[in-house]
Amino acid sequence: MVFEAVEPVRRVSIIALCAWFLIRFIGHAARNVTEMRREAGKKVDVVAVDAIAKLARISTMITAALVT
């Protein structure tokens, strides 16, 4: 009875952890792109980097919700 719930909980947990990893990875990648371009002395369009990161995070959340 209780053991029947283990598999669905495990699936949802794995999907949630993957989504959490991807969301944090996207945030760190956006920050790194901004910092690396500033250190190189190049122009940085912070609004574009932020917008792309937000879109990637939202699409990750939507995909994770649809997969579960």
Image: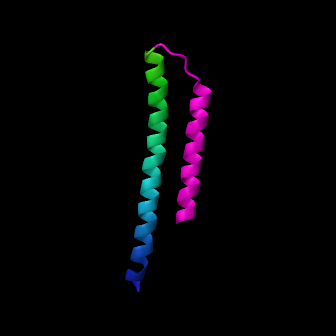
Query: Residue at image x 42%, y 49%?
Result: 21
Dominant secondary structure, magenta: helix
Residue 40 position within the rendered picture, expressed as x and y whole percent measured from the top left? 44, 15
Q: Position of residue 31 (x, y in %)?
A: 47, 30
Residue 17 sits above or below residue 43 on the image: below
Q: Position of residue 3 (x, y in %)?
A: 37, 81
Q: Which residues are magenta?
A: 41-68
| Count of numbered badges drawn on the protein | 0
Q: Percent from the top left, x then y, of residue 28? A: 44, 36
Name the residue located 43 percent from the left edge and 63 percent from the top edge. 13
Quadrant in the rendering for residue 32: top left
Figure colour scheme: rainbow
Q: Residue at the top extreme?
A: 41
Name the quadrant of the N terminus. bottom left
Q: Is residue 18 magenta?
A: no
Q: Is residue 57 magenta?
A: yes
Task: Tell me what residue is drawn at x 48 percent, y 18 percent.
Answer: 38
Query: What residue lies at 53% left-to-right and 64% top-to-bottom?
Result: 67
Toward which corner of the image does residue 52 lie, by quadrant?
A: top right
50 vs 1: above or below: above
Q: Is residue 13 left or right of residue 53?
A: left
